[in-house]
Image (cartoon, grey):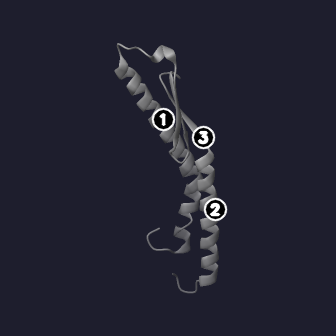
């Protein structure tokens, strides 16, 4: 802690930040994101916190002779949804976690 810093004020700041962090995490757990691949042939739904909730596959994407392409599309849609969730998470949590450095806490 830096010299002259008020420990009570620091504790209050930390409590506020913790409440804001918890609220942001709860919001991310409820916010849905989607990932698509193949021009919408495969759509994956997940929460912004990373819980996958569903997969939709357009019947035209199903070719018994080419299962590998469908597998690739599903994987690409999962990655797309995960990236959308990370982007939203970074936008919500980034300002909160970057504030830790301003408190003079080592390692932040």
- Residue 11 pos. (x, y %): 60, 78
Task: Decide which of tag 1 and tag 2 comes sooner along the chain.
Answer: 2
Q: Residues within 10 Å of mark 1 (few under 14, many from 20)?
A: some
Q: Are marks 2 and 3 in contact (CB under 8 Å)?
A: no
Residue to which mark 2 is pinned: 20
In the picture, measured across the screen, residue 23 lies left or right of residue 106, that is right
Tell which residue pokes out farthest to the bottom in this image: 4
Marks 3 and 1 sit apart, C-alpha to C-alpha, by 13 Å
Residue 6 appears in the picture as rendered = no
Q: Quadrant of residue 94?
A: bottom right
Residue at the image position 52 percent from the left and 19 percent from the top:
58
Q: Nearer the viewer, mark 3 or mark 1?
A: 3
Q: Quadrant of residue 99?
A: bottom right
Q: Which of the two residues, 47 or 103, is positioned nearer the viewer here?
A: 47
- Find numbered disc 2 in the image and state the secondary structure of the residue it sits on: helix
Q: Residues within 10 Å of mark 2 (few under 14, many from 20)?
A: some
Residue at the image position 47 percent from the left and 22 percent from the top:
38
- Residue 60 pos. (x, y %): 49, 14
Task: Decide which of tag 3 and tag 1 comes sooner along the chain.
Answer: 3
Q: How many numbered markers are drawn?
A: 3
- Find numbered disc 1 in the image and state the secondary structure of the residue it sits on: helix
Q: Are marks 1 and 2 in contact (CB under 8 Å)?
A: no
- Residue 25 pos. (x, y %): 58, 55
Residue at the image position 53 percent from the left and 48 percent from the top:
49
Residue to which mark 1 is pinned: 80
Task: Decide which of tag 2 and tag 3 comes sooner along the chain.
Answer: 2
Residue 46 appears in the picture as rendered = yes
Q: Which of the two residues, 27 or 2, is positioned nearer the viewer here?
A: 27
Q: Residues within 10 Å of mark 3 (few under 14, many from 20)?
A: some
Q: Which of the two residues, 88 or 78, is positioned nearer the viewer here?
A: 78
């Amino acid at each position: 802690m830096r010299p002259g810093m008020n420990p009570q004020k620091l504790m209050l700041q930390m409590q506020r930040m913790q409440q804001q962090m918890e609220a942001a995490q709860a919001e991310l757990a409820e916010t849905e994101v989607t990932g698509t691949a193949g021009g919408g042939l495969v759509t994956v739904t997940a929460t912004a916190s990373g819980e996958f909730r569903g997969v939709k596959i357009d019947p035209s994407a199903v070719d018994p002779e080419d299962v590998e392409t469908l597998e690739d599309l599903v994987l690409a849609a999962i990655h797309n949804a995960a990236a959308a969730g990370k982007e939203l998470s970074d936008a919500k949590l980034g300002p909160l976690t970057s504030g830790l450095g301003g408190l003079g806490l080592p390692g932040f």
